Image (spheres, helix red, strand yellow):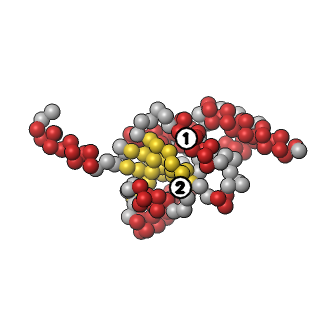
Amino acid sequence: MTPYADDLAPDRERNVRRAVCPGSFDPVTNGHIDIISRASQLFDEVVVAVGINKSKSRARLFTAEERMAMLEKVCADFPNVTVAGFEGLLTTFCEEHGIPAIVKGLRAVSDFDYELQMAQMNSSLVGVETVFIPTSPEYSFLASSLVKEVATFGGDVSGLLPPDVLTRLTERLAERAREDDD
């Protein structure tokens, strides 16, 4: 290494590029993993932040703990990715953890309209920046809600989810079906 490069090394260590990938991840899909993977290549540290909204807990298929456990397993191959839960405002989470950037995947123009407003609000609140990553074409239609609906009616979602998540989804839907029969 040249002396010049040695002089820069401490600066690189102090200026770690950190970002958060937020979502409900109910369940985590291959589309989520695609965005997390790509974010992990752009940032030194990525926190996958699972939103915990107690008012929506009954509508969720998986608990926050289950969603975080699934994410930890599917993100294990990304050494710079961690998983955490958060309640309240994402901007508060970012402030508390020194995270200056939010990464959001965009599937369509309709996503952009909503996400741009959210990005501008977040920036006005605490100065956090939002980085948009376009979803890979093979995942452009993919949403957790659609996956749950298709799976509920017996459709094949095996190509849309990591294998362990597919197993958990199949088991949970079978549990719910038994509960509904009772």
* 19 lies above or below 171: below
Give the percent coordinates (x, y) of residue 35.
Answer: 48, 43
**Would residue 39 be seen by someone viewing this image from the given angle?**
no
Task: Give the residue number, with chain letter if any, for mark 1.
Answer: 71
Tell whether 100 sits left or right of 87: left
At 53% across and 55% down in the image, what residue appears? 86
The image shows residue 139 at horizontal and vertical percentages of: 56, 40
Give the label on residue 157, or none.
none
Quick one: label 2, few (<14), some, or many (20+) residues within 10 Å?
Answer: some
| Secondary structure at numbered mark 2 | strand
Q: Which residue, given by chain and number where applicable, does mark 2 sit on? A: 86
Closer-to-camera residue (80/33): 80
The x, y position of residue 138, in whole percent, is: 55, 38
The image quadrant where one finds the C terminus is top right
- Secondary structure of the residue carrying tag 1 is helix
Image coords of residue 172 (percent x, y): 73, 40
